[in-house]
Amino acid sequence: EPEVTQTPSHQVTQMGQEVILRCVPISNHLYFYWYRQILGQKVEFLVSFYNNEISEKSEIFDDQFSVERPDGSNFTLKIRSTKLEDSAMYFCASSEAASRMFFGEGSRLTVL
Amino acid sequence: AQSVTQLDSHVSVSEGTPVLLRCNYSSSYSPSLFWYVQHPNKGLQLLLKYTSAATLVKGINGFEAEFKKSETSFHLTKPSAHMSDAAEYFCVVSEQAGTALIFGKGTTLSVSS
């Protein structure tokens, strides 16, 4: 079965540092997403990306966050200046227009 | 606005007994509904998906769910639990393809021998 891959699997960073989480979506998919799950809480939508632009974003996705598809294969989430409350598992997902969403295994971010 | 309510935060069953994980949804349109499973330290795996075709949806690993519009429910069932079913289960709603998924808070399924 096709897979969405995410790197790193776990990143530890100091508060205020920039973090980039990387995702390789499934190759023929057109829609890309980031979700996060704070420990013990539910999975929350951050942002969706289609046709090289953000199509939808939640109130969580503030100016500290940005997404990019720099080379046609990777899909990155950047957090400019991390805060303690950014500690979470971040899931990347991709989908074709009308089919199931495939999730990666997640990148665990720990902000100290 | 869409929302999902998973009625039980934790369900415990014995191996070989039936599983019922309850989910109610709210949506302005005809929604797509999903159940995802998350095993410890693993990503989210799609169990099954309803998109206005048959109301009884069969998924992987023997799970199925029935869409009941009159009750706005999409409960997940399995006739006989297996130890490997122990995981976190999420009921999810989406109003149309390509838009954000709205997750329920999750139900932890424990299976004892």
Image (cartoon, coloured by chain):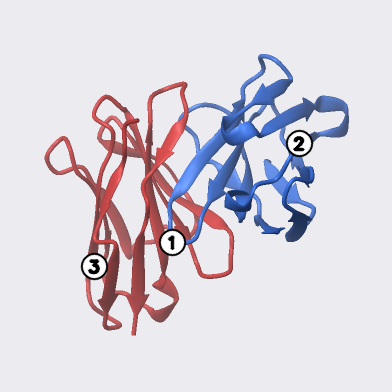
Chain colours: A red, B blue
Say what secondary structure mark 3 lies in: strand
Q: In the rendered structure, the residue with mark 1 lies on which chain?
A: B
Which residue in the protein does label 3 denote?
A19
Q: Nearer the viewer, residue A47 or A73?
A: A73
The label shown at residue B79 is: 2
Q: What residue type is labelled 1?
A: Asn
Mark nearest the camera among 1 and 3 is 1
Q: Residue at horizontal 42%, vertical 63%?
A: A89
Q: Residue at horizontal 19%, vertical 43%?
A: A74
Coordinates of residue A58 in the picture (x, y in percent): 49, 52
Q: Left or right: where does residue B74 sit relative to residue A101?
A: right
Q: Which amino acid does label 2 sit on?
A: Pro
* Structural crowding at the residue carrying mark 1, measured as other residues with C-alpha within 10 Å and reported as few (<14), some (14–19) or many (≥20): few
Mark nearest the camera among 3 and 2 is 2
Say what secondary structure mark 1 lies in: loop
Q: In the rendered structure, the residue with mark 3 lies on which chain?
A: A
Q: Residue at horizontal 52%, vertical 70%?
A: A39
Q: Nearer the viewer, residue B92 or B42?
A: B42
Q: Left or right: where does residue B70 sit relative to residue B83?
A: right
**Earlier residue among tags 1 and 2:** 1
Coordinates of residue B94 in the picture (x, y in percent): 59, 34
Placement of the N terminus of chain B among the 4 image quadrants: top right
The label shown at residue B41 is: 1
Residue B88: quadrant of the picture: bottom right
